[in-house]
Image (cartoon, rainbow, N blue to C red):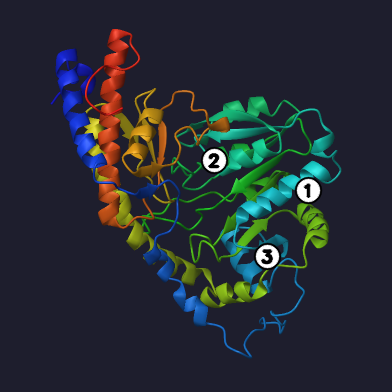
């Protein structure tokens, strides 16, 4: 069959009627499926249940003899700092261990910068304008956090190697630009790992603002789908140190998609100057985080070899789910109405429809019982300039449900595409065909 753009209008209108009839049949089933967020499935969570039994009475002290049930060690127990520091590629001495959400540590860094100012700098709240660079498509929660503080969100295009560094280097000449968000490995949602060139250019930035910071959210540092040929990410902190710019970045990660999404540990790694600044404010904020949980994680993962073996089990569960969706998308590509990434790791597939179709696809899916990430959410202010990007999260549903959800998604892409092509040809908003509304 020719691609949709090659079909004459009469054939395309007839096809649209057929698609809408099929859609109404699916909608009548009353599906209730969710592909909106990158949550681990129950079978993935089960992989860490042994962690619940690896602590016994009388064995709740660190290797140095510190009692984990008591106050102390605000920045985390040594074993957890060593583990998370290695994942981050940062010294354990300047790695801070938090609760289950690395987003909370990012929020802390922004809050402290906003209220108190970074070392030697004016608090952001006393500056007329604060701008944050947002490589897009990107992580909606990053954008929402910056918007919550009233910062101006500045889109930066994503390339196959990472953020467009020509754009970044031009934008940081503005002293109001204080930060850039980065998910450098298996990025959310594109699945891109930043190239060595991008990392080196990032580490060599000379921003006009002395308090500019790179927010390096390495959430998927060990989350490979192809465990035999994983992507390799250059160590940003080492590159910064070579350039004498070690204070220019905060790095973050967590075990949220390694162990328990709601019961993991998080970490922030940084330079000694930034660490001392961060600790000064955390000392006022909290007495410390759950060291028993930190010990539980450290006992389960005494070294990176144990992490690697554990993540191979995750990959074995996730590969068939990703492949199921990728296989079902293939006909859309042959019809010329969609394109997508084939990630080597991470938690998402990024689907691009024809321009002007993503919101319509989201609406149709929702009405038929499948919830997607809101189209546009992967861009600052929730506004996709081309209305084409949809983030697919295939991790949570079992494959039987995933097949139903992906089939409906593909059907909705077909309907929205046919409607858009016909509307473009006639100059109308939507063709008058079929029952789907």
When the figure is inspected, residue 434 is found, relative to residue 235, above or below; the finding is: above
When the figure is inspected, residue 297 is found, relative to residue 332, above or below; the finding is: below
Looking at the picture, tell me which residue is in the foreground, 11 or 431: 431
- How would you rate the neighbour count of disc 3 (Cα within 10 Å): few for under 14, some for 14-19, many for 20 or more? many
Single out the mark in the foreground, 3 or 1.
1
Single out the mark in the foreground, 2 or 3.
2
Q: Secondary structure at mark 3?
A: helix
Residue plotted at (61% across, 36% down) = 201
Could you say where residue 233 lies in the image, as x and y percent from the top left?
51, 49
Could you say where residue 142 lies in the image, as x and y percent from the top left?
60, 42
Q: Secondary structure at mark 2?
A: helix
Q: Which residue is mark 1?
A: 112
Q: CA distance from mark 3 to mark 1?
A: 22 Å
Q: Which of the marked residues, 1 or 2, is nearer the chain's N terminus?
A: 1
Looking at the picture, tell me which residue is in the foreground, 218 or 431: 431
Q: Which of the marked residues, 3 or 1, is nearer the chain's N terminus?
A: 3
Q: Secondary structure at mark 1?
A: helix
Residue plotted at (60% across, 57% down) = 101
Q: Which residue is mark 2?
A: 140
Q: CA distance from mark 1 to mark 2?
A: 22 Å
Q: Residue furthest bottom?
A: 58
Question: Does the CB distance between marks 3 and 1 fall below 8 Å?
Answer: no
**Residue 345 relative to residue 10: left or right:** right
């Amino acid at each position: 069959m020719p691609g949709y753009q090659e079909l004459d209008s009469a054939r395309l209108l007839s096809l649209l009627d057929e698609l809408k009839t099929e859609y109404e049949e699916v909608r009548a089933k009353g599906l209730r499926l969710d592909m909106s967020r990158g949550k681990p499935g129950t079978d993935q969570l089960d992989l860490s249940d042994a962690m619940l039994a690896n602590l016994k009475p009388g064995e709740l002290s660190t290797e140095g003899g510190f009692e984990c049930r008591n106050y102390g060690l605000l920045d985390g127990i040594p074993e957890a700092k060593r583990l998370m520091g290695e994942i981050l590629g940062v010294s354990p001495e300047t790695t801070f261990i938090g609760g289950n959400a690395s987003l909370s540590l990012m929020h802390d860094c922004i809050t402290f910068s906003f209220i108190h100012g970074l070392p030697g700098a004016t608090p952001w709240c006393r500056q007329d304008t604060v701008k944050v660079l947002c490589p897009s498509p990107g992580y909606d929660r990053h954008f929402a956090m910056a918007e919550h503080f009233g910062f101006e969100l500045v889109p930066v295009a994503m390339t196959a190697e990472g953020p467009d560094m020509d754009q970044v280097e031009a934008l940081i000449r503005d002293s109001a630009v204080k930060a850039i968000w980065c998910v450098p490995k298996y990025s959310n949602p594109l699945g891109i790992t930043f190239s060595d060139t991008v990392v080196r250019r990032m580490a060599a930035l000379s921003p006009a603002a002395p308090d500019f910071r790179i927010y390096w959210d390495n959430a998927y540092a060990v989350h490979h789908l192809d465990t035999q040929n994983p992507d390799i990410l250059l160590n940003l902190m080492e590159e910064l140190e070579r350039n004498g710019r070690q204070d220019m970045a905060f790095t973050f990660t967590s075990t949220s998609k390694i162990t328990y999404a709601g019961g993991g540990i998080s970490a922030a790694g940084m330079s000694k100057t930034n660490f001392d600044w961060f600790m000064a404010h955390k000392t006022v904020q909290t007495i410390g985080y759950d060291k028993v949980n930190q010990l539980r994680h450290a006992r389960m993962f005494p070294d990176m070899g144990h992490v690697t073996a554990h993540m191979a089990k995750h990959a074995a569960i996730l590969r068939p789910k990703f492949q199921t969706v990728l296989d079902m998308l293939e006909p859309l590509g042959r019809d010329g109405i969609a394109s997508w990434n084939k990630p080597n790791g991470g938690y998402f597939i990024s689907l691009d429809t024809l321009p002007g179709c993503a919101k319509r696809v989201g609406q149709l899916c929702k009405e038929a019982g499948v919830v997607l990430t809101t189209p546009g959410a992967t861009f600052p202010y929730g506004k996709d300039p081309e209305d084409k990007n949809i983030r697919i999260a295939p991790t949570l549903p079992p494959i039987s449900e995933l097949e139903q959800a992906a089939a409906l998604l593909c059907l909705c892409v077909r309907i929205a595409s046919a409607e858009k092509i016909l509307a473009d040809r006639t100059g109308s908003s939507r063709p008058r065909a079929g029952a789907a509304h």
